[in-house]
Amino acid sequence: MSVVGLDFGSQTSFCAIARQGGIEVVANEYSKRATETVVSLGDSQRYMGTAGNEKRISKIKTTVLNFKRLIGLPFEHPEVQELVNGEFPSAVKLVKDEATGLAAVDIPGEGTYTITQVAAMFLGKMKEISDTNLGRSTEDCVITCPVFYGEEQRRALNDAAVIAGLRPLQIMSETTAAALAYGIYKQDLPEAADPSRKVVFVDFGFNSLQVTTAAMNKGKLTILGSAYDKTLGGSNFDKVIWKYMNDAFIEKYKVDTTKNIRALVKLVEACEKTKKTMSANGIDIPLNLECLMDDKDVSGKINREQFHELAAPLLARIKSTLERALAVSGLKKEDLYSIEIIGGASRMPCFKEAVKTVFGLEPSTTLNTDEAAARGAALKCAILSPTFRVREFNIVDSVINEITINWAADGTGANGGELKIFDAKNSFPYTKAMTIHRKTTENFEISARLSGAEGGNKDLAKYEVSGINDLNAEEEKGKKIKLYFRMDGSALFQLSAAEQLEKYEEWVEEPVEPVKGEEKPAEDKPTEEAPKEAGDDKMETDKNESQEGDKMETDTPKEEEMKKVKKLRQRKIALAISTPFQYGNLPTSVLNKYLEIECELRSKDKEEKDKSDARNALEELGYAIRDRLYAKYDGYVQEEEKSNLSKTCDELEDWLYGDGEDQAKGVYVERKSVLEALIQPIENRVMEFVKRPVALEKLTATLNKYQKICGEVEAQVPESKYLHLAPEDIKKMNDALGEGWGFFNRTQSALKGVEKYQDASVTAFDIESKSNYIENLCKPIANKKPPKVEPPKEDEKKDGPAAEEKKDEKMEADPVPANTNDDLD
């Protein structure tokens, strides 16, 4: 089971995995831990993450940026319309998906994709990063989302993960994930029975500001409340600088970037870099761009004081959100222990100053500003995983919107009703139960509405309960129906179960109670105990007699008189639940269609990648041959052959950037094979020139080694350890050595005068084969062990140790040679 945490960000995203006893944020194929949240479509292939970000300018009309804020939103939503008709329109055309009503992107030449599908494409990229680092397929994960994501956006994110091939165990708020990453490692938290530590977590990201207050105890985290501004982030400050610079450029250079989307994006990105530079420097920061518009180079400058003055309305909004968060938590400034800030935009000095002004505490950067949410998500996944042992840490989150349910009357006197089932700030995950009465067996509908949500109340879900039976029809109030409403860990609401409470009668046996005043049976009367001493004496003198006496003194209890009575019982009968409508939930048919489309796109991506890899391999080989002709192959090819190969490489380059720019994979593979066949003889000559001397040296060493052994035996050198070898073995070795020396001499003659560019008649393989042949024939003979010489038998011991010592002395004085040829006659 995989343990993965995915921080799905507006500008960049992070992947954290659990391994080697800890949480690690892993890098993508570009060795970057931050993966840009970008999907670039078109060119018959998708580019996600860093690869897509590289195409954001060149493919501006097919590259989708900043889509996190739009996931799950209908096309008519104000945030979508702001990108359609606002001051900063989306470079990609936004349209309405007719099947779902959701916002979608229209990609020229590709088609229309909903934002849920775009998010699925990107999450598939994050899955690929996780798979690469884990070495296996990733399924189980926890994904973060903003605290203000409603039911529709959380469900859309869950659907996107499923389309991407993931199985999200939970959709977790970013600030809650950061709080978990903060609290689980703290050893100095108060005990469960002590007053908790109050910590505020402020996440100031690219698009939004989120503030959450948490109460910390050992092993427990309780969210006290949250406040947010979903349209206030670091990008707003970038746009402040953009407006200042654009006005200056209109006046100075007569260029207006609002008239050119490509120029607008370039200027906004330059303003973001200026903002980051200004965070560390209080001096005037220059901004220079070449060929911004109409072939004009532009330049401007801004300092921190000017920036703060321009951003004053934004700073006021920040303070307002922070104050609202404090009010929602019900705490005072004095109750707070620390203020933890995260998010890329939190590095701005003006933001830190605003936090300090509102809370009266210096903001702390204990957590990693960029990676805290991803680490917290991975920790939550580890807690949910049965394969990891994690310190017990309970999380109680807080609902941000009220949920009201209502049910219709049945037309027979049983009234309908309305009930607020979840209040704002209610904790979750949590299950609430309620009982209603129905007088008919007809199916009935329950509606859930989101109260107090932005833009007014929203229909959240409709459930139909069926399967009610006709038992207990005579009950005055009607049949009891018990409903269970669940808010799960992902803050998703559902009617989890429905039961009918059925009353029925059952005959049971009970003991008959005695009538008042009637004498109790004898067995119930207390009996007088025998004196202890007498009893003890009797037990000691005669055991059997004592037992018999006991039986005589004790009356046999009478059987209890029983009677049958009728009892009223209650049991639960499960009812069927269907969900005709769930806000934000994709219909099964649509979800399956999206899954099919994603599978087709993945297959197409793989096909295009294989084709691209084959083309790149062919192009790389062409450039490599051109370089080798004047380096590695120098001297191994004649001028004519070199000229022909150089011409072939030039023709290949022209073809690759002409007719061969977009060919099937097989065409590139075939051309590469032809090119490899052309250079193979040259490669062989280079290899032979290097290997032949080594092989000859090895052959010479082998011949000399066994020649020496044969010489020692033939000369009967006393120190030789091969004198035991038989004459026929020596003959075999000499024959092989003669053959080897003959081969060596012929080879030397054949190689004499051979140039580098010529193919020799004898190869390194031939020489190595001859060397191995001699080694395999001679080595077993040379390794033969000398025959064993049995030691002389000892005489029987007659005189004990003395005789043994005498015998040893004799052996030491007159040793017998190991090998003797003395003639005893």
Image: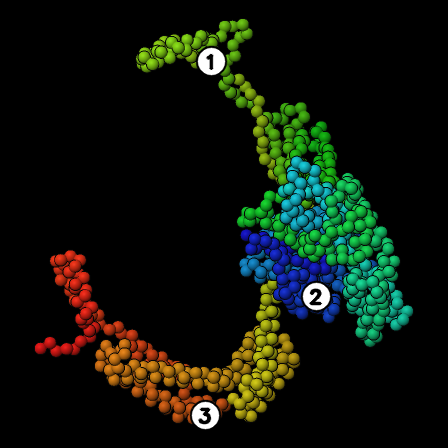
Mark 2 belongs to which amino acid? Answer: Asn
Q: Which marked residue is nearer to the observer: mark 3 or mark 2? A: 3
Mark 1 belongs to which amino acid? Answer: Glu
Q: Which marked residue is nearer to the observer: mark 3 or mark 1? A: 3
Label number found at residue 561: 1
Label whose residue precedes the other's in the sequence (3 or 2): 2
> Cα distance, mark 3 to mark 2?
56 Å
Q: In the drawing, does residue 319 fall left or right of residue 756?
A: right
Q: In terms of secondary structure, where does tag 2 sit?
A: helix
Q: What residue would you read off at disc 2?
A: 53
Label number found at residue 754: 3
**Residue found at x 61% / y 54%:** 23
**Residue 466: quarter of image:** top right
Above or below, 131 relative to 319: below
Mark 3 belongs to which amino acid? Answer: Val
Above or below, 135 relative to 229: below
Residue 143, given in percent of the width and then of the height, sits at 65, 52
**Residue 190: quarter of image:** top right
> Cα distance, mark 2 to mark 1?
88 Å
> Cα distance, mark 3 to mark 1?
122 Å
Where does the C terminus fall, quadrant-wise? bottom left
The type of colouring in the image is rainbow
Above or below, 193 relative to 344: above
Q: Residues within 10 Å of mark 1 (few under 14, many from 20)?
A: few
Q: In the drawing, does residue 279 fall left or right of residue 127?
A: right
Q: In terms of secondary structure, where does tag 3 sit?
A: loop
